[in-house]
Image (cartoon, rainbow, N blue to C red):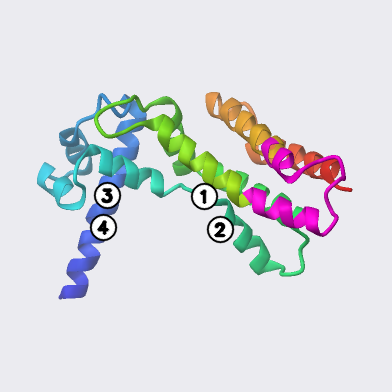
Amino acid sequence: MARKTKAEAAATRAALLDAAEEVFFAKGVARTSLEQIARHAGLTRGAVYWHFKNKGDLFMALVEQVRMPFQSLMDEVDKADAELSPLESIRLACHAGLVRLEQPSYQRILSILLHRCEFFSDINPLDMQEQIGNECFEEMLNVFVLAEQQQLLREDLSPEVATRLMQSMLGGLFHDWLRNPEAFSISERGGELIDTAIRLMQR
């Protein structure tokens, strides 16, 4: 019985997150109430407060679903092939991230964070974006440092500049794509850019 209750609680939480994703995307975060989310999920507002302290907590849980720490992407590609060079690991990890971005839920939630979330109460979307960007930078930098130590990075390119080049390129591509996701495949166009950038960075 306890197992069923735990499963039901998890299902309720998932339903609320799904409803929040849909309503936030349609109306924006600031203009959405917890009552609207509960109603959209076919639940009560009490169910929302059972799982989340407030709207900010619910929004944070939603964003956490699509966070892709660069190190986790690296771990995935390295698990598939432990003999990869640092630059090849970066290349494949970036490819994997772009493929994941094309999943509808990732696209919608990140679009909410970037374009449909205003400053309010305990939510600062710019701080959240800064935190995610800084985390990605530090984790990618560690791998570029390793590439430099193995004399794989061209001599006139520092790991710091290489990381900023890659992050700026991918960030610009991501923003262009989110404005009109139907215009092009981010995994295809981004894949070409990633492969070209890595070739230019190699010694």
Contact check, label 3 and label 4, Cβ < 8 Å: yes
Contact check, label 2 and label 3, Cβ < 8 Å: no
Within-10-Å neighbours for mark 1: few <14, some 14–19, many 20+: some
Determine the residue positioned at 48% across, 36% down: 130
**Magenta stretch in the rendered image:** 140-164
SS of the residue under disc 2: helix
The residue type indicated by label 3 comes to Ala
Q: Could you tell whether 130 is left or right of 15 in the image?
A: right
Contact check, label 4 and label 2, Cβ < 8 Å: no
Q: Nearer the viewer, mark 3 or mark 1?
A: 1
Instruction: Residue 11: give its label.
Output: 4
Q: Whole-Å distance between the Cαs marked 3 and 1?
A: 22 Å
**Residue in front for this viewpoint, 49 or 26:** 49
The answer to whether residue 185 of the structure is visible from this angle is no
Q: Could you tell whether 18 is left or right of 96 in the image?
A: left
Q: Is residue 68 above or below residue 193?
A: below
Q: Which residue position holds label 1?
A: 68
Q: Which residue position holds label 2?
A: 72
The earlier-in-sequence mark between 4 and 1 is 4
SS of the residue under disc 4: helix
Residue 158 located within the stretch drawn in magenta: yes
Q: Main secondary structure of the magenta part?
A: helix
Q: Which residue position holds label 3?
A: 15
Determine the residue positioned at 71% across, 70% down: 82
